[in-house]
Amino acid sequence: MKKFACLLSVVMMSALVGCGDSLPPLTPVTGTITMDGEALDGASITLMPAENTAGRTASGVSDASGNFTLSTTFNQELGTAPGVIGGIYKVMVTKTEVVIDDTELSMEDMSTMDGANTMYDNQLGGMTEDGENDGGYGDPESLIPAQFGVADGNNPLKNVTIGGTEEAAGPAQSVTITLDSNALTGTVQ
């Protein structure tokens, strides 16, 4: 009987150790994105839980064919996993390019007061009015209309519903995002 009790306690301890954080059921979500009838390469697609949705933000980046796969980021322990928690999400799309200030100074330039001032200015980079330092990279330049990337009512993209619940993932889902940069409209299907 003692051996059985020991074995039972080992099994119970093993079960408790394995009961840490775990991922919720995630619905696989892939899709395509176009702008003005052409595939949109390098766009960041973000799904943010709409009001009354208990999901988590999911995101992905489109390839040269406009294809993307969405993943959800959890805490540091769980990391990122492919898929989206079922619910209703706001759709946001951004595509930016960072302008790098590659001004370099020689040692001779830095030996003068003007050179030192220039070095100081470069180190401050793009110190913004609110005191934030952008590391000398400047503000990212949007390559598509900024309205597609906002989370408020100014975003012309409608919400999308991802199948599944907190208890079970939905079937794999495909999302098609179509942007029109001239009319500032877009559809999500």
Image: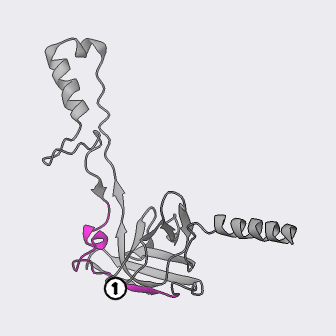
Q: Residue at x 24, y 16 (%)?
A: 110
Quarter assignment of residue 90: bottom left
Q: Does residue 162 belong to the magenta stretch?
A: yes
| Neighbours of disc 1 within 10 Å: few (<14), some (14-19), many (20+) | few
Circle 1 residue: 52
**Relative vertical location of residue 30 with respect to residue 108 in this rendering, above or below:** below
Q: Residue at x 21, y 77 (%)?
A: 154
Quarter assignment of residue 48: bottom left
Classify the position of the N terminus by image quarter: bottom right
Query: In the figure, is residue 175 to the left or right of 120?
Result: right
Q: Which residues are magenta?
A: 143-164
Q: Position of residue 105 (x, y in %)?
A: 28, 22
Kind of residue indicated by mark 1: Asn
Q: Residue at x 24, y 42 (%)?
A: 133
All told, the count of numbered labels is 1
Query: In the figure, is residue 119 to the left or right of 178?
Result: left
**Relative vertical location of residue 5 with respect to residue 123 in this rendering, above or below:** below
**Helix, strand, or loop for circle 1?**
loop
Q: Position of residue 134 (x, y in %)?
A: 27, 44
Q: Nearer the viewer, residue 58 or 156?
A: 58
Q: Nearer the viewer, residue 22 or 67?
A: 22
